[in-house]
Structure formats: C-alpha cells, structure tokens
Amino acid sequence: MSESVVAGTFPRGGELLKRHRLSTRIWHWVNAVTLFVMLLSGLMIFNAHPRLYWGEYGANPDTPWLKIGSARTGPGESGYLQLGGARIETTGVLGIWTDQDGNLQRRAFPYWATIPSRYSLAGARIWHLAFAWVLALGLLFYLLWSLVTRHLQRDIHITRAEWRPTHIWHDIKEHARLRFPTGAAALKYNVLQKIAYAGVLFVLLPLMILTGLAMSPGTDAWLPAASELFGGRQSARSVHFICAFLLVLFFLVHIAMVVLAGPFNEVRSMITGRYRLPPERSAPKETGQ
C-alpha cells in the first residue's frame, strides 16, 4: 500500500507514488527464483517414480491416483497422463518425448521442464533441498517483518465486510469485466487478491514445507508426527505435488492480471517501488430525453 495513503493523504489518478517496501520487493523476486528452481528440480525428482498414492506406502504394484507413463499402442508407443480411471494421451510432451540429442526418452517430464535437464535424481535433490532452505527461511523472515511493519494487518487482513458474499461476488464480476480499481483505490488489495495472497502465505507455502519434511525419512527421528499428520508419507507426497501445481496456477493467474492491468506499471512497482495510479474513471454522461 502507498505510504501516502498510510499517512492519511488521498492521492489522485496519474500520480507516481511509493507502493511496495524494499522488503516486499526483495522477497518477491527471491521467492520467484526459488519457486522456479524448486518446481523444475521437483519435476526431475518426480521422474524417478512418476506416480502418486494415498497412504503410507506406494510402489509399482500399487494403484496410483495419478500416473504419467508410456504404453505400446499398435506399432508404436504413446505417452499418457492417467488421473484415476481417466487417461489422456500426452505423446511428445509427457511420458514419451525426444531429448535434445534426438533420442526417445520414456520419462514423465521432458528435459526442458526439469533441473537438471539430463536425468539426475541426486542432482535434482541437491538443487531442491538447497532452495528449500531459501524458501523456508525467506518465508519466516518475511512474515516476521510483515508483522513488525503491520503489512499483514494493514494489507492482507480480510475485514468482516469484505467476507460478505455480495462483496466477493461484486469483485468477481468486476474482474470478469476487466474493470480494475483506479485512483487511490488501486493501492489497496481487493478481497480476491487478499484471499489469494493469504492462501499462498498461510496455506500453500507452509504446506509445501511441512509435506517436504514429512517425505524425508530423517524427519521421523525428530518429528514423526509430520508424516502421521497427512496419513502417511505417500499422502504427504501427493499433497506436496498438489500444492506445487496450485502455486503454478496462482502464478499463471498472477501474470495474467499483471498483463491486463498494465505490465510496465506493475513490474516497475515491484522493481523500484514506484507505481503510477491509474486515472479515475469519468462518470457516464447523462443523455437528454
């Protein structure tokens, strides 16, 4: 939120104001790189056993709720994504694809979507665990600093009035019509933004960290309740990947909103902290009888 609004002044549309604190901007970009590396290294780890189960155990003979693989179909092979009883053909993208050397590979995710690009479970784990520390410590320090600066209470807290179904429905309709806030109102998060950001900060990211711990056999030595909380290590792994793809969905929606709201202004505000207020909408002119 703008420091001018906090100070009690009311800026007008077109003014260039300070919007994001330095701590928010640093955490935003560090977190973007961190999640990118963790996603791609996590997909490489998934390639080692491209199946997801519920419960404590899961291996090849068990029935997964999600599976990416390849199967012989007539004279050739096809890749597929299987979700429960439904199967979708994904030849060339998932399950079976051609690598950078022109060789046919039978792995879940292709080389351009993984870190490292060539199969290496050990290498992927090193990348993943290294950036897991960046994610966990960054989230901890960001939340503590946000409490000190009252960023959470001021900008993320959802008021009782904002929880009203009519208020939420109004914001949904405004977004569907691509009618974004203008003037001083653009400096405040609307209820949909608050719900999304709160969901990431207090649900998805903590779940990613906790399920990551629950999947580690070493965690049983000092926190056995971690895997028990999710009903088993395989359930924790499933929740971990579900949260990962919900974060991807959040990212795609976030980028779409940035593009629609004005990418130059939005990106500048997250780099320099400066944001130009969109001009207020002019009231519709009355027509004579």
Image (tube, helix red, strand yellow):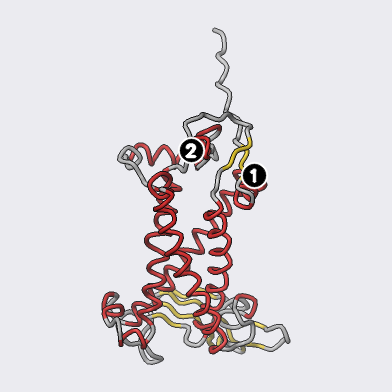
Instruction: Give the number of callouts.
Output: 2
Instruction: Look at 33% across and 41% down and name the residue there.
Output: 159
Other-residue count near label 1 (Cα within 10 Å), few / some / many at <14 / 14–19 / ≥20: some
Q: Nearer the viewer, mark 1 or mark 2?
A: 1
Mark 1 or mark 2: whose residue is earlier in sequence: 2
Residue 88 point in image, percent of width and height? 50, 73
Residue 27 point in image, percent of width and height? 53, 60
78 vs 242, left or right, is right
Disc 1 residue type (three-letter): Asn
Determine which residue is flagged by label 2: 174
Instruction: Look at 53% across and 87% down and name the residue there.
Output: 71
Instruction: Look at 26% across and 79% down and name the residue there.
Output: 225
Disc 2 residue type (three-letter): Glu
Residue 269 point in image, percent of width and height? 61, 47
Instruction: Look at 55% across and 32% down and name the residue there.
Output: 183
- Element on which disc 2 rests: helix
Determine which residue is flagged by label 1: 265
Splitting the image into 4 quarters, where does residue 121 fall?
Answer: bottom right
Q: Quadrant of the C terminus?
A: top right
Other-residue count near label 2 (Cα within 10 Å), few / some / many at <14 / 14–19 / ≥20: few
**75 or 52, nearer to the observer:** 52
What is the distance, in whole Å, between disc 1 and disc 2 at their CAs? Answer: 20 Å
For this orientation, the residue located farthest to the right is 101
113 vs 215, left or right, is right
**73 or 276, nearer to the observer:** 276
Residue 226 point in image, percent of width and height? 30, 78
Q: Is residue 105 above or below residue 93?
A: below
- Element on which disc 1 rests: helix
104 vs 137, left or right, is right
